[in-house]
Image (cartoon, rainbow, N blue to C red):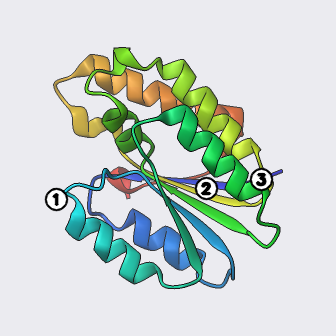
């Protein structure tokens, strides 16, 4: 059974740093970054890369979910020494895949994330923004909450830390 923890909260609250510190004693780690590599996010991406250091292998997502998932699964399966993975930003990834969530089926996105996590038994840390940041857009809040719910239920994740309520 995978050792999976789910950390959720507002942007900039320290979720990623917490997960990185939690994995600091592990030698081989994979970081899946979901921020688009644009000028808007460049400072954040560079800060995260600098903070993580050399024991991390980084895979950045693109605009092709299926291609990214295949590349990640291949990388994970071909690295016998890999012990942990930090997936940083499920909803960020989903949002940036398309401007409209209807263009990519949420069920397809969720099933691909489940495939990824199921690809290797190891330590997984999933860090994500809280759906509550989408106040006023009830349809999106419900959609994003459903993605979280489906992944949490599929893996019976018990270690969930929500910075909104700490």
| Up-down relation of residue 117 to residue 125 (above or below) | above
Q: Which residue appears at 56% of the width and 29% of the height?
A: 110
The label on residue 2 is 3
Q: Distance from label 3 to label 1 (Cα)? A: 36 Å
Give the answer, above or below, for where 26 lies relative to 112. below
For residue 5, which numbered disc appears in the image?
Answer: 2
Q: Secondary structure at mark 1?
A: loop
Instruction: Name the residue: 43% across, 20% down.
Output: 104
Q: Residues within 10 Å of mark 1 (few under 14, many from 20)?
A: few
Sequence-wise, which precedes: disc 3 or disc 1?
3
Q: Residue at x 80, y 54 (%)?
A: 121
Q: In which image quadrant can residue 90 be found?
A: top left
Residue 157: mark: none
Residue 116 in picture, x, y percent from top left: 66, 43
Which image quarter: residue 55? bottom right
Q: Is there any visible trace of residue 67 in the rendered image?
A: yes
Say if mark 3 contacts mark 1, CB within 8 Å: no
Q: Is residue 142 left or right of residue 86?
A: left
Real-space Cα separation, disc 1 to disc 2, in angstroms: 31 Å
């Amino acid at each position: 059974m995978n050792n999976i923890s789910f950390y959720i909260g507002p942007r900039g609250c320290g979720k990623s740093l917490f997960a990185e510190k939690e994995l600091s004693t592990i030698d081989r780690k994979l970081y899946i970054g979901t921020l688009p590599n644009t000028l808007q996010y460049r400072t954040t991406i560079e800060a995260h890369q600098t903070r993580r250091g050399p024991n991390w292998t980084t895979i950045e997502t693109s605009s092709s979910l299926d291609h990214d998932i295949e590349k990640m699964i291949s990388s994970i399966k071909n690295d016998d020494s890999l012990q942990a993975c930090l997936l940083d930003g499920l909803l960020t990834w989903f949002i940036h895949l398309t401007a409209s969530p209807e263009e990519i089926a949420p069920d397809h996105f969720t099933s691909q994330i489940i495939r990824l996590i199921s690809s290797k038994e190891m330590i997984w840390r999933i860090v994500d923004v809280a759906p509550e940041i989408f106040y006023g857009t009830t349809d999106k809040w419900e959609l994003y909450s459903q993605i979280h719910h489906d992944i949490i239920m599929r893996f019976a994740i018990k270690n969930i830390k929500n910075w909104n309520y700490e």
